[in-house]
Amino acid sequence: MSRFDGRKEDELRNIYIELNPIENAKGSAIFAFGETRVLAAVYGPRGSKMSKDYDRAFLRVKYNMITFSVPERKKPTPGRREIEVSEVIKRAIEPALLLEELPGSIIDVYIEVLNANAGTRTASINAVSLALSLAGIPMRDLVSSVAVGKVGQKILVDLNKDEEDYNSEKLKDIEEKRKFIEFYGEGRATDIPIAYLPYKNEISLIQLDGEINNNELKDAINLGIKSCKNIKNLMKDKILEYFSDTNIR
Ligand code: UDP
């Protein structure tokens, strides 16, 4: 018995990382958790009238889901969700940046969700973290991120859309009902995106949508931190590999 897509409880979806796919950006990265694929690009730091008197760099983050990234056509104009997710990503990343080393400048971060199957904000944080480091923005460490949660009665990492939408009462097919209730148990899903600052052993983002008790939350957070540490190591290895090849620009 396993999850909808065959994974174990603590197993991430396949991670795909591509560094600097965008020639014209200062730094860019694609990060994917399975079918959730996100592109982040960094422009700057650059001087601007608006920021010239600031004693630190000003970080701007714009998260966008492209029209064909979801099964139902997404309106191209940003809605409330995009504005909120942009702010959440900015706050998760900002503590790791040495913005005081770049006074009077602006750093623009653009995120395009290419394909969404849950976990786009967490994939975005990983992509942004990589893109900022490739852009040479001074950082204390990479920030890594993943969602954990409770689906039915199970504590899991990296929920996909079917799991985020899980509701044991809505499983119609008798065979599916038997199979999935046996694994997940009764109930609905609680999604908890987490971002982690390895250098401080601190969490810079935690959101909670649903219901969970204290002990379960502790287990979920521990699973999230363990997974974030693995993701960070993978990201770091990719960067080291990139610079050991002939990719220095
Ligand atoms: N989603 C969608 N259309 C939308 C917004 C979201 O189909 O306009 C889907 C998409 O798969 C997304 C998932 O719902 O990844 C969960 O969205 P949520 O707001 O929880 O954020 P995420 O998990 O992507 O960070």
Image (cartoon, rainbow, N blue to C red):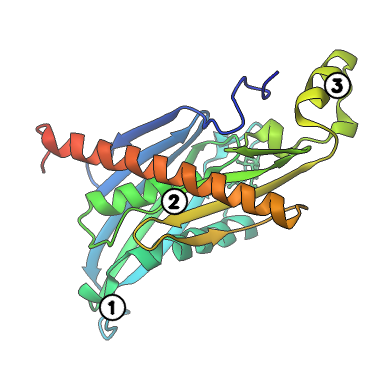
Q: What kind of residue is marked 3?
A: Lys
Q: Residue at x 30, y 79 (%)?
A: 51
User: Which one is in front, 48 or 14?
Assistant: 14
Q: What element carries label 1?
A: loop
Q: In which quarter of the image is the C terminus?
A: top left
Q: Which residue is drawn at 76% across and 30% down?
A: 184
* Residue at the spot of label 3: 177
Mark with earlier residue (1, 2): 1
Q: What element carries label 2?
A: helix
Q: In which quarter of the image is the N terminus?
A: top right
79 over 245 or under it: above or below: below
Between the residue at mark 2 and the residue at mark 3, the CA separation in whole angstroms equals: 35 Å
* Residue at the spot of label 2: 125
User: Which one is in front, 52 or 216?
Assistant: 216
Q: What kind of residue is marked 1?
A: Arg
* Residue at the spot of label 1: 56
Between the residue at mark 1 and the residue at mark 3, the CA separation in whole angstroms equals: 55 Å
